[in-house]
Image (tube, helix red, strand yellow):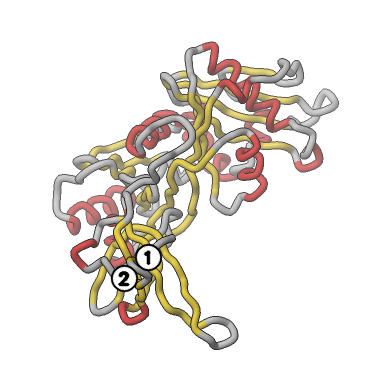
Amino acid sequence: MEFTVGGRLELRISADDVGKRVSVRSLTDSADGGPTFTDTVGVLTSWTDGVLSVTRRGGRSVRLAESDLVAGKVVPATPARRRGPAAGVRELAEVAARGWPAVETARLGGWTLRASGGFTGRANSVLPLGDPGVEPDEALAEVVRWYAERGLPALVQVTTGGGDGDEMLAAELERRGWTAERFALARTGALAPLADREPDPRVRLARRPDESWLGAYRRGAWTASAEAALTVLGGGPSVWFATVPGEGPNADPAAIGRCVVDGRWAGFAAVEVAPERRREGLATAVMAELARAALAEGASAAYLQVESDNTAALALYDRLGFVDHHAYHYRRAPRA
């Protein structure tokens, strides 16, 4: 990371650069009490009363004292080169929303309010793709009211790190006391390599989930609203469910998965493997057979969403060629 001009550190950012992607170096105390430098890259979301707030790619914000800055500059809004299928944040967010459709939706300008009886955050949060069309106070009051009528907490899904993300919205919500939770990554990859292996006869595909598939799906929230869960899981342009049966006539499935095909995109979700059957390659087999079905329908690109701290899943998806596209998290309204 280069901050110098002619060998001198330079601070080349100001409060006028709020909303831009920046790279800053600040002076901090090390564990042994001596000074050390810390580099921070992200969107400059505020610069007030001598304190800067920088929202990093993963969605977490860092506050820095202006007096601790030793260098800084504006950097390109997105990396010059990105591996994986080309797509903007908005395109991928819209595809993912169609692939995990809420039971009920409402429009507030460019925002979509989604509710599904509490089944998953994606199906029970605001997707803010544009301007709500009203002042922030009015928009957030309407969001809180709409979710309260349905007995649900008000959540906003906030994207970050994609060049056209919602860092400024995240900063505004944070200022208003909306707390951050459930950090996740949207990842993309080429579809064909996933299916580049011999067909696995252990994997069975179906258009609807049966009771054994639902029993293996480990998001226990679906039992609280089974009808809503089935609507979300079965919704989408073209949905496939994969099951690897367990050993024995009444055994639980060894592995399951879900894929939804939408034009060039194939979205993977609900890839679960029974604890006692892990490290047998079953997750890879499930994704391969789902990818084969998606390829037959004309898809060419793959996406999935995974929690940022799910190291086992991240390692698997790394091996399968997935790379980070953008991050997202949820903002929860403060208690009234």
Q: Which residue is pictured at 65% across the width and 20% down the height?
A: 196
Q: Which residue is pictured at 35% across the width and 51% down the height?
A: 156
- Image position, residue 254 (x, y; %): 75, 32
Q: What quarter of the picture does the N terminus occupy?
A: bottom left
Task: Say which element carries label 2.
Answer: loop
Q: What quarter of the picture does the C terminus occupy?
A: bottom left
Can you tell which quarter of the image residue 193 is in? top right
Q: Which residue is mark 1?
A: 3
Q: Residues within 10 Å of mark 1 (few under 14, many from 20)?
A: some
Q: How many numbered discs sit on the rendered protein? A: 2
- Residue 250 tag number: none
- Image position, residue 158 (x, y; %): 36, 50
Tell me which numbered mark, 2 or 1, is placed earlier along the sequence. Answer: 1
Instruction: Reply above or below: 294 against 187.
Output: above
Residue lying at the far front in this picture: please name it.
6
> What's the residue type where badge 1 is placed?
Phe
Asked if residue 248 can be seen in this view, the reply is yes
Residue lying at the far right in this picture: please name it.
248
Q: Which residue is mark 2?
A: 10
- Image position, residue 179 (x, y; %): 39, 63
Residue lying at the far top in this picture: please name it.
296
